[in-house]
């Protein structure tokens, strides 16, 4: 393990408290959309929490609230005890689309948050290179986004989210737009990356298997207005092996519990 990785490992995960959070979008002329209803979640520092739920149940709304991108209707969100009202320096975000700036090369995309905050680029350049190396992109620092595959671009987006060592990493369906094989590789790589960094992660997905594989805890959301229907602790030893996980009895048991929760809400219907 090189010096940079062990540096990254020392970063502390943030504690997150979501207290009685509701969100209603006020739409002009049309009915208001009640997206989230009285959500309470307490996340321990350094834990990996996955959120699964049907399309439109309010997952991205929850993430945008935690990222400080949109205002709350009721309740509060605390990150290390601090109420979130705007984007917080301790929080990194990865979206489904990589949002690369196509006119900037890879390393300049990773360094973007540093520049936006007018911080010292030189100080972070080595960290950026180390992060890229950890996700298998050594030698790609000067390539343009158009020269990379979708999976590689998403790796760059993850490095960009990690550059300032966020205590909390928010990921909104980060592998949703990738082909199936690339997605499997990214799942394995994310586990390895998090094993080193050990920050707090909130990972949104509609993939039940990736949620159970990656997380310490899976929260299952109901259809809109989103609530937490099931809070499941995943007690499987780490590191977990993706190959063969679907045959693991413990894994199957968790997947079944989540599926049954969806079936009870009519989200999954057997014919
Ligand atoms: N800016 C907005 N204005 C009005 N309605 C919105 C807005 N953003 C999301 N919604 C609605 O809120 C609900 C939850 O959306 P979202 O959080 O994106 O769900 P998910 O990520 O689970 O698919 C949906 O019905 C969606 O149409
Ligand atoms: Mg969404």
Image (spheres, helix red, strand yellow):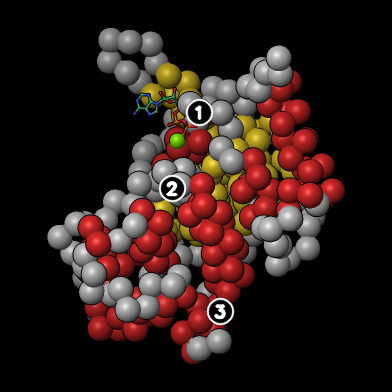
How far apart are labels 3 and 2 at the CA level?
31 Å
Q: Distance between the residues labelled 1 and 3?
A: 36 Å
Q: Position of residue 146 (x, y in %)?
A: 23, 58
- Position of 263 compared to 50: left or right? right
Q: In this view, does 120 lie to the left or right of 154?
A: left
Q: Nearer the viewer, residue 269 or 164?
A: 269
Give me the residue at 36% from left, 39% from top.
70
| Mark before the other along the chain sequence, 1 or 2 | 1
Residue 72 showing in the rendered view: yes
Secondary structure of residue under mark 2:
loop
**Nearer the viewer's eye, disc 1 or disc 2?**
2
- Marks 1 and 2, how far apart at CA: 18 Å
Pointer 1 local density, CA inside 10 Å: few below 14, some 14–19, many at least 20: few
Q: Mark 3 points at which residue?
A: 10
Mark 1 CB in 8 Å range of ligand 1? yes
Split into 4 quadrants, where in the image is the N terminus? Answer: bottom right
Q: Where is residue 157 in the image (x, y as percent from the top left)?
A: 36, 59
Quarter residue 189 falls in? bottom right
Q: Residue at x 43, y 47 (%)?
A: 178
Q: Do the residues labelled 1 and 3 touch (CB within 8 Å)?
A: no
Write down the quadrant of residue 92 in the picture: bottom left
Q: What element carries label 3?
A: loop
Label placed on residue 55 = 1
Q: Residue at x 35, y 20 (%)?
A: 26
Q: Examine the rendered structure and indicate whether residue 254 appears above or below residue 111.
A: above
Per the image, the residue denoted by label 2 is 178
For mark 2, does the 10 Å Cα neighbourhood hold few (<14), some (14 to 19), or many (20 or more) residues? some
| Mark whose residue sits in front, 3 or 2 | 2
Dot 3: within a 10 Å radius of its alpha carbon, few (fewer than 14), some, or many (20 or more) residues? few
């Amino acid at each position: 393990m090189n010096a940079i990785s062990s540096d990254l490992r020392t970063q502390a995960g943030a504690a997150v408290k979501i207290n009685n959070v509701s969100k209603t979008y006020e739409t002009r002329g049309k009915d208001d959309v009640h997206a989230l209803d009285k959500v309470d979640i307490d996340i321990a520092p350094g834990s990996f929490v996955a959120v699964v739920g049907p399309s439109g149940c309010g997952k991205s709304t929850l993430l945008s609230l935690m990222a400080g991108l949109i205002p709350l209707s009721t309740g509060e969100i605390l990150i290390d005890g601090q109420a979130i009202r705007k984007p917080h320096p301790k929080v990194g975000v990865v979206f489904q689309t990589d949002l690369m700036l196509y006119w900037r090369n890879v390393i300049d995309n990773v360094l973007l948050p540093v520049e936006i905050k007018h911080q010292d680029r030189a100080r972070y350049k080595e960290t950026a290179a180390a992060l890229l190396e950890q996700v298998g992109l050594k030698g790609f620092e000067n390539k343009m986004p158009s020269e990379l595959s979708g999976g590689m671009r998403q790796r760059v987006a993850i490095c960009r989210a990690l550059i300032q060592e966020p205590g909390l990493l928010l990921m909104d369906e980060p592998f949703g737009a990738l082909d199936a094989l690339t997605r499997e590789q990214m799942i394995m790589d994310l586990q390895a990356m998090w094993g080193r960094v050990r920050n707090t992660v909130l990972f949104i997905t509609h993939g039940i298997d990736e949620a159970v594989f990656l997380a310490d805890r899976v929260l299952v959301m109901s259809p809109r207005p989103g609530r937490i229907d099931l809070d499941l602790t995943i007690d499987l030893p780490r590191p977990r092996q993706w190959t063969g996980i679907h045959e693991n009895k413990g894994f199957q048991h968790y997947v079944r519990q989540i599926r049954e929760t969806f079936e009870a809400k009519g989200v999954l219907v057997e014919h």
